[in-house]
Each structure stands twice: as structure tokens, then as C-alpha cells.
Amino acid sequence: MPALQSFLSRNPFWKSLDISWKEGIAASVMQSLADDYSIPLALFLGAGPVEIGLLVAIPSLASSVIQLWTPKVVDLLGSRLRFLVRSTAGQAICLLPIALLPCLNGTWRITAFIVFVTLFRILGSLISTVWGSLTSDYLPAEERGHYFGWRTRIIGIAGILGTIWGGVLLFSYRGILQAAGFVILVAVAAIARFLSSAIMSRMQDLPGG
């Protein structure tokens, strides 16, 4: 950590870089809970093999195609940071109805789940591209590998801990309380994303794209 602080202190955007890795911890916890447990939740909602296939295929295809419109979306908002803050909050909002699905009944739940997961993944794909663009502009080319490598290690640990916690939670709520376990898990993921959005809003915006 002292070496990193020394490295950051030499950068004029060190505050944003310091904020970025802290935001990444909350984002990684959210991602581990939302992604690693999406198929178990789909199975709990009654998804069969076809629905699981659609859950995997549709969000992946949609998030890949939407990449073509990333510059236009950012141009509409006029700011990469504004886009990031609103999109991360949008991801959190997508998780809220998903958290309610285990408490409801009906075969329509899996369709709704696929729709919300698709919206969630589309936003995630756009966020990843724009975040990489903005954060790279904080760093000279020769220092990007050092910073991103360090940040990836930190958020990777957070993601693993999030996955472990989610597994322990669902195991603890197995049986008749399993629905409650999924509600808590997705709700925590939404809270983590709201937190990462709030932290990210403190970063410095830069012109360009």
C-alpha cells in the first residue's frame, strides 16, 4: 500500500485513481453476487434447459451488439462520468425487481428475469467500455499496467469473498427459506451497486471519449 500511495501521489488525478479502486471493491461484490448466482436463481424460479440457454445467450448477444452505440450514448449525456454514474445506478435499479421475483408466483417470472438480466448486462457492457476509457485517461500509458494490475488483484479478492458469502447465505437459507436467501443476496448486490455509483460520482470527469 505505501508503494501504491507513492505511485498515486505523483499523478495529478491521484484522487480519482484512489476512488476508482475503492469503487471497484463494491462493484466486484455486486458482480460476483449478480453473475455467479444468476443461474441458481433461474433454476429456483423454474427455468428449464431452454430458458437457461436463453438466459446465457440473449444477454451476451445484446451486450455485444450494444457496444456499437456506446459513443452515441455517451455523446447524448455529454460526459463519460455522468454516463457511468447513471448507468451504474441503472444497474442497481435493474436488480431491485429481480430481488422481488422469488417472492412471487407464476411462470412469467423467468421471462421477467431474463429481461432484467439482459438490461443489467447491457448496462454492464457499456459501463466497462466507458470506465476503461475514462480511467485510462488518468494515467500515462507506461503506468496503466501497474495500476490496473494492482486494482484487479484487489477487486478480485473482493469478488471471491462476495461469492463465498453468497454461497454461505444460500446454504444457510436452504429449504423452505430459500426464497428469502435469494432476496437478501440480490438486495445486497443492488446496495453494493448503489454504493459503487455513489463512490464513482466523486471521480473527476475529463473531456474526450
Image: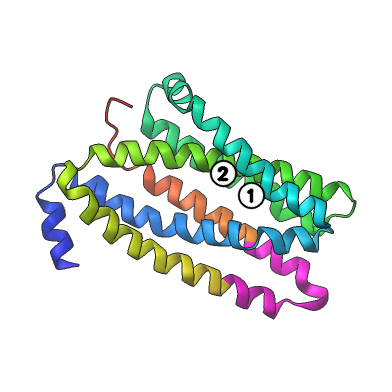
- Quadrant where the image shows the C terminus: top left
Q: Position of residue 173 (x, y in %)?
A: 72, 76
Q: Magenta: predominant secondary structure element?
A: helix
Q: Could you tell me if the residues under marks 2 and 1 are in contact, i.e. CB atoms within 8 Å?
A: yes
**Residue flagged by tag 1: what amino acid is it?**
Leu
> Tag 2: residue type?
Gln
Magenta-colored stretch includes residue 180: yes
Coordinates of residue 170 in the picture (x, y in percent): 68, 73
Query: Mark 2, residues whose alpha carbon is within 10 Å: few (<14), some, or many (≥20)?
Result: many
Q: Which residues are magenta?
A: 166-185
Left or right of residue 48: residue 37: left
139 in the magenta segment: no
Residue at 46% across / 54% down in the picture?
27
Expressed as whole percent of the image width and height from the top left, the position of residue 177 reads 78, 73
Q: Please, is residue 169 above or below residue 115 in the view?
A: below
Q: Which mark is residue 197?
A: none
- For residue 162, above or below residue 171: above
Residue identified by numbered label 1: 95
Q: In the image, is 149 to the left or to the right of 43?
A: left
Image spot of residue 6 (x, y percent): 11, 59
- Please give the name of the residue rendered at 46% of the width and 58% of the height, measured from the top-left corner: 28
In the picture of the structure, the residue carrying the numbered disc 2 is 91
- In the rendered view, does 115 fall on the left or right side of 119? right
Q: According to the image, what is the colour scheme of the structure?
A: rainbow
At numbered mark 2, what does the secondary structure look like: helix, strand or loop? helix
| Residue drawn at 46 percent across, 52 percent down | 195
